[in-house]
């Protein structure tokens, strides 16, 4: 009940003053602000955002964190790159990106994006160390459907469980239709301010591509809203920019693959990138699992191509999605369980959203745990020669865990 007319009138006055709504936003306000890791997170950091109106000189500002931004000597301003994107309803929006470079390792920075009249709030991030110091990150399977209603909760619980996670790693099917802006709107609603503070790394699932059954080969390409929303590394094979790449974070080389196209090119590149790995650990992300757990699925082509490379380089962990189930294999080599002290690879499939399939697989004998019916997130810590993996449900309760040691 309205106690008096004052609040309403004040609200109307504020709306008039802002020529907008009372949430302080207008068509020039930065929205969907998201940090992405670069190839070297100890020295650089990427940020992407969008506005509904065209901006003449979009930019980003950064300085080392202090009690207050001093806006003086240490403040750096860099020009952003802009892209006009036409949505399905013919409406134009404007995506902007900037990469902060020459940063100091292991340092907290504050930054904001926008223009002189419409800045975002200040947010902060921490650069990676040069050394192999311990860290933890969050891994999430497909959010995909009912994101606002059903995934907001698990994102918030994940943030509460691991507030110091240095990044979140998604393995695709972030949305159900990668060409549909309303789906991305739900995703960023669910994220809230988290990706402005915690960088995201991700790769495309099949839902960020068209459905192969209804499209000709020439039209089979990455959804046009993928690259607009992210600024991911471009150090992968040609033609797969921002979908296949590697990032060295302290003691781990992370390799992100695109399970939708150009498998052979990726396999050659993967073999080289893992041969040159200067880090003690190697973790691979891919959407489509090599040992599928969903009924009527078996990705043999990927399995035949990738598993020998994973085995050759003793990849420690392969993080997957797509099957909308949960599974974690034993440590495997050449498709066979090996002892805990042997070299081998653990494969995990997880799901963060509410779309859940029945688990049914011919690979049951390889699974240390297999189940369905739960939205989950994982916190993975790397502390020198130990990797500690924990999977949690939406209540924040431990669901699965294991430790790898070198
Ligand atoms: Fe999928
Ligand atoms: Fe999916």
Image (tube, rainbow, N blue to C red):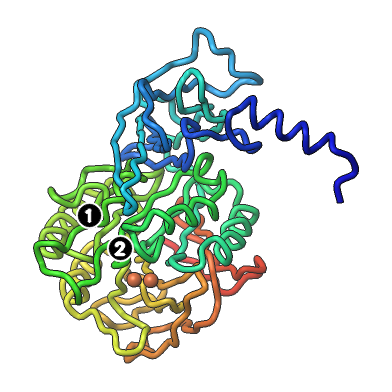
Q: CA distance from mark 1 to mark 2?
A: 8 Å
Quadrant including the C terminus? bottom left
Instruction: Let me know if residue 130 appears in the view.
Output: no
- Residue identified by numbered label 1: 274
Residue density around tag 2, few if under 14, some if 14–19, many if 20 or more, within 10 Å: many
- Residue identified by numbered label 2: 315
Query: In the rendered view, would you say 58 is above or below 6?
Result: above
Residue density around tag 1, few if under 14, some if 14–19, many if 20 or more, within 10 Å: many
Return the residue found at the far right.
Answer: 3
Query: Which of the four quarters of the rendered structure image does ligand 2 lie in?
Result: bottom left
Give the quadrant of residue 43. top left
- On the image, the x and y values in percent for residue 384 come to 46, 50
Give the quadrant of residue 360. bottom left
Answer yes or no: do the residues labelled 1 and 2 have beta carbons within 8 Å? yes
Q: Nearer the viewer, residue 26 or 196?
A: 26
Return the residue found at the far top.
Answer: 73
At mark 2, the secondary structure is loop
- In the image, taking residue 332 as reference, residue 69 lies left or right, namely right
Look at the numbered disc 2 and say if its residue's Cβ is closer than 8 Å to ligand 1. no
Residue drawn 46% across and 28% down?
113
Query: In the rendered view, would you say 275 is above or below 121?
Result: below
Query: In the rendered view, would you say 78 is above or below 151?
Result: above
Give the quadrant of residue 268. bottom left
- In the image, taking residue 347 as reference, residue 356 lies left or right, namely right
- On the image, the x and y values in percent for residue 385 come to 44, 55
Number of the label disc, if any, that sits on residue 353: none
Instruction: Let me know if residue 156 appears in the view.
Output: yes
At mark 1, the secondary structure is helix
């Amino acid at each position: 009940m309205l106690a008096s007319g004052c609040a309403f009138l004040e609200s109307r006055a504020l709306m008039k003053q802002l020529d907008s709504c009372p949430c302080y936003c207008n068509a020039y306000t930065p929205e969907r602000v998201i940090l992405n890791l670069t190839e070297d997170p100890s020295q650089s950091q990427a940020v992407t955002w969008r506005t509904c109106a065209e901006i003449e000189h979009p930019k980003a500002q950064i300085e080392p964190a202090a009690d207050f931004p001093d806006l003086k000597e240490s403040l750096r301003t860099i020009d952003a790159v802009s892209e006009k994107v036409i949505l399905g309803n013919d409406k134009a929006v404007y995506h902007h990106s900037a990469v902060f470079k020459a940063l100091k390792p292991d340092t907290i920075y504050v930054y904001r994006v926008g223009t002189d009249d419409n800045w975002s709030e200040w947010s902060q991030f921490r650069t990676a160390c040069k050394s192999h110091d311990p860290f933890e990150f969050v891994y999430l399977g497909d959010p995909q459907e009912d994101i606002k209603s059903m995934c907001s909760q698990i994102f918030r619980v994940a943030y509460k469980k691991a507030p110091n996670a240095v990044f979140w790693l998604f393995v695709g099917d972030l949305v159900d239709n990668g060409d549909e802006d309303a789906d991305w709107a739900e995703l960023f609603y669910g994220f809230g301010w988290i990706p402005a503070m915690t960088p995201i790394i991700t790769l495309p699932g099949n839902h960020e591509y068209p459905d192969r059954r209804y499209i000709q080969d020439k039209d089979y390409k990455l959804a046009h809203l993928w690259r607009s929303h992210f600024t991911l590394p471009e150090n992968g094979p040609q033609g797969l920019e921002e979908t296949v790449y590697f990032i060295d974070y302290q003691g781990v080389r992370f390799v992100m693959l695109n399970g939708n196209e150009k498998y052979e090119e990726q396999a050659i590149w993967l073999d080289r990138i893992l041969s040159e790995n200067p880090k003690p650990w190697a973790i691979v992300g891919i959407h489509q699992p090599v040992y599928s757990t969903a009924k009527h699925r078996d990705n043999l082509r990927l399995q035949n191509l990738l598993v020998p490379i994973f085995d050759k380089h003793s990849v420690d962990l392969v993080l997957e999605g797509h099957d909308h189930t949960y599974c974690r294999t034993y440590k495997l080599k050449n498709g066979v369980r090996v002892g805990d002290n042997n070299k081998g690879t653990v494969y995990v499939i997880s799901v963060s959203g509410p779309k859940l399939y029945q688990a049914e697989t011919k690979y049951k004998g390889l699974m240390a745990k297999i189940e369905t019916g739960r939205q989950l997130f994982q916190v993975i810590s790397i502390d020198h020669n130990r990797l500690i993996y924990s999977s949690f449900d939406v209540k924040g309760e431990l669901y699965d865990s294991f430790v790898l040691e070198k």
